[in-house]
């Protein structure tokens, strides 16, 4: 069974940093591109970042470019999102999503940025 | 980026009656490989989105056949033939034809 389990969310002040993790199981992680998608409270889904299967290529939404870094450890079957210089508008549930099919989503982890 | 526009924003429906949601893309979603990567997802409160339909009209295994997708090019529709209580929530269209993937703003289906 495919499972994606996010962790690392929390409450922090503007300007802070956080690293999210997404532990994958039930499939060959190294074969799949992975996304981070976020959803602010009561709002729509917004794509954040994409990494290819071996980690050699990454892309970001303009809103997070230069502040967020996506990475992966295929030996540990884990996807990461390093988040720096956090702003109030980054407050959201962050989901990891397996490839463009979007057939598999994690449960999400809540990041709250507030003073 | 491709902009996905959904209508209506909200759809109050009587149980057992049909519902229809439209999704329009800012450019054609036909990929160079000939396929159209338009999907529909359903999200219940407090839950992650769940894929219902991919490539316009293909239901994921386990999705009831009261859900159907149609459309071509830039205009797409999700239809629920007879709404059941478990169908409430927000429906999103999503395109994966051109990076980055983008989502519609969502349509809330609620029971009237």
Image: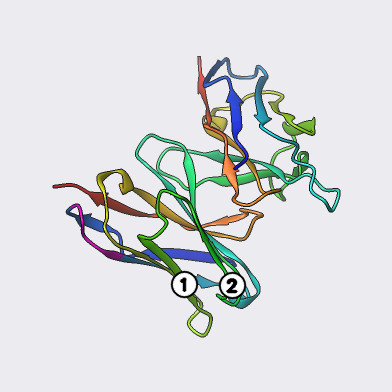
Residue B78 magenta-highlighted: no
Mark 1 — on which chain does it sit? A
Task: Say whether residue A93 is left or right of residue B110.
Answer: left
Q: Does A72 sit above or below residue B40?
A: below
* Residue A25: quarter of image: bottom right
The secondary element bearing badge 2 is classed as loop
Residue under the point 45% across and 50% down = A62
Q: Nearer the viewer, residue B38 or B31?
A: B31
Counting residues from the start of the chain, the first of labels 2 and 1 encountered is: 2
Residue at 57% x, 34% y: name it. B104
Q: Residues in magenta?
A: A14-18
Q: Position of residue A31 (x, y in %)?
A: 65, 74
- In this view, A30 is above or below B22: below
In percent of width and height, residue A106 lies at 48, 58
**Figure disc tally:** 2
Residue B5 location, x and y as percent? 60, 28
Residue lying farthest bottom? Answer: A75
Label 2 belongs to which residue?
A26
Q: Label 2 is found on which chain of the structure? A: A
**Residue wearing tag 1:** A71
Q: Are marks 2 and 1 on the same chain?
A: yes
Label 1 Cα crowd, 10 Å radius (few <14 / some 14-19 / many 20+) = many
Q: Quadrant of the N terminus of chain B?
A: top right
- Residue B66 vs A81, above or below: the answer is above
| Residue A115 percent across, percent down from the top left | 13, 47
């Amino acid at each position: 069974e495919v499972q994606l389990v996010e962790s690392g969310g929390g409450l922090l002040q503007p300007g802070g940093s956080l690293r999210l993790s997404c532990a994958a199981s039930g499939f060959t992680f190294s074969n799949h591109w992975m996304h981070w998608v976020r959803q602010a409270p009561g709002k729509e889904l917004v794509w954040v970042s994409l990494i290819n299967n071996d980690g050699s290529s990454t892309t970001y939404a303009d809103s997070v470019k230069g502040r967020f870094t996506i990475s992966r450890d295929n030996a540990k079957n884990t996807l990461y999102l390093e988040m720096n210089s956090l702003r109030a508008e980054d407050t959201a549930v962050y989901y990891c999503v397996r490839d463009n099919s979007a057939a598999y989503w994690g449960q999400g982890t809540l990041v709250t940025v507030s003073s | 980026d491709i902009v996905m526009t959904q209508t209506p924003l909200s759809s109050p429906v009587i149980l057992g009656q049909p519902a229809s949601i439209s999704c329009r893309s800012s450019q054609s979603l036909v990929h160079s490989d000939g396929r159209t990567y338009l999907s529909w997802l359903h999200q219940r409160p407090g839950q992650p989105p769940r894929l219902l339909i991919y490539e316009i009209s293909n239901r994921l295994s386990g999705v009831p056949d009261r859900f159907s997708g149609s459309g071509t090019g830039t205009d797409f529709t999700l239809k629920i033939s007879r709404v059941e209580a478990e169908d409430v929530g927000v429906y999103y269209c999503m395109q994966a034809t051109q990076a980055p993937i983008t989502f519609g703003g969502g349509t809330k289906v609620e029971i009237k």
